[in-house]
Image (spheres, rainbow, N blue to C red):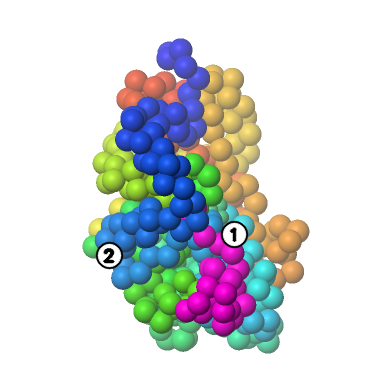
Amino acid sequence: MSAEPIAFIDLQAQRRRLGARLDEAVLSAINEANFILGRQVAEFERALESFCGAKHAIGCGNGTDAIALCLMALNLRPGDAVLVPSFTFASTAEVVAWLGASPVFVDIEDETYTLDPAGLEQGIAAAKTANLIPRALISVDLFGQPADYDPIEAFCAHHGLTLICDAAQGLGASYQGRLVGSVGTFTTTSFFPSKPLGCYGDGGAILTDDERHAELLRSLHVHGRGTDKYDNVRIGVNSRLDTLQAAVLLEKLAVFPEEIAMRDRVAGRYQDGLADVVSVPRIRQRCTSVWAQFTIRVAASHRAAIVADLKAKGIPTAIYYPKPLHRQTAYRHYPCAGNGLPVSDRVADEVLSLPMHPDLDAKTQDVVIAAVRECVSKA
Ligand SMILES: *Cc1c(COP(=O)(O)O)cnc(C)c1O
């Protein structure tokens, strides 16, 4: 067993691997002293555009603001509804409520944890029953795997909904040959340190191919400015990607393709080592995941004991997410599609995420795999 404690996400190991190039990037940003919207921000936006194959990237303060800004660009208002999965991080629904509109919760697929296209019609019906106007749908690339975009896009087109792809966990993945960031009207992402592409603080970005929306977003995220900085043409917010974070991100994006391959190897070793004893993730045909999490499923009645056993063996785990949003105090009064969301309810009781990061070496991972096998068979 390794002397170091096993990390759930080892940012120190990544930092060691990046070495002096990161020191130099941060130091030159400090020396240049253009802390707000310095050259690194524009450089990173252009680099992100080419990485994702999107026409426009707009940096912003975090992944939550990124979604909120898209909804502001759509002029979302009270009385409007946005279809969102219930099994996700709170941001996805929070921003809808924040603008006075109403999230309508829909269910996910049992095997991929992303939106179930078959349940979306019921979401529209639930919105209409509540006298709401369905305006948009936010899909989530949960745990790093893109949502099932073909049927979701067709559904959105049929109902005139704007598709916003919340790719806080999915940046760098692909859906049947299409890169995440090139699907939907908007793609949003987060650079929170633990995301696949993380910075050293908060950060986020929006990707879009639409020139008009891009222009609007560039105004909205800096107080609604017009062509002159002190002539505000609309009500906006202050949500900028920090120059220092952009400097970090330029270095991290340069090695991101390599890290995605490393993540894939880690996921492959988990699949090989665990598939015969627990339920392991399933990735759709001709799709890739960036493995924001490696999430297994165990019997609900045994999960707490398995977590405790693993902890006693020095294996950190996490539960994303223990309670679907439609069951949470802040959200339970919003409409749900159909007769409840049975898949969201079930998976919330069964999921368990294992240590996952590009620098997880085979030896350490063998320790994790052996511990999981032992704890699961005992339970
Ligand atoms: C992390 C995350 C967000 C929010 O990103 P922040 O940068 O923390 O605001 C939104 N959606 C999903 C699915 C996330 O995982």
- The residue to which callout 2 is attached is 53
Q: Quadrant of the C terminus?
A: top right
Q: Position of residue 285 (x, y in %)?
A: 28, 58
Q: Residue at x 47, y 86 (%)?
A: 159
Amino acid tagged 2: Gly
The dot on residue 184 is none
Q: Earlier in the sequence, mark 2 or mark 1?
A: 2
Left or right, 39 with respect to 136, comes to left
In the rendered structure, which segment of residues is drawn in magenta?
A: 220-242
Judge whether 301 appears above or below 362 on screen: below
Q: Position of residue 330 (x, y in %)?
A: 73, 61
Q: Could you say whether the residue bearing mark 1 is in a helix, strand or loop?
A: helix
Cβ of mark 1 under 8 A from ligand 1: yes
Q: Position of residue 376 (x, y in %)?
A: 50, 29
In the rendered image, residue 339 lying in the magenta stretch gets the answer no
Judge whether 324 appears above or below 234 on screen: above
Q: Position of residue 368 (x, y in %)?
A: 44, 25
Judge whether 260 appears above or below 92 on screen: above
- The residue to which callout 1 is attached is 91
Q: Residue at x 48, y 23 (%)?
A: 6
Q: Residue at x 25, y 58 (%)?
A: 286
Mark 2 or 1: the one toward you = 2
Task: Please state which of residues 218 and 191 is positioned toward the viewer in this rendering.
Answer: 218
Amino acid tagged 1: Ser
Residue 152 in view of the camera: no
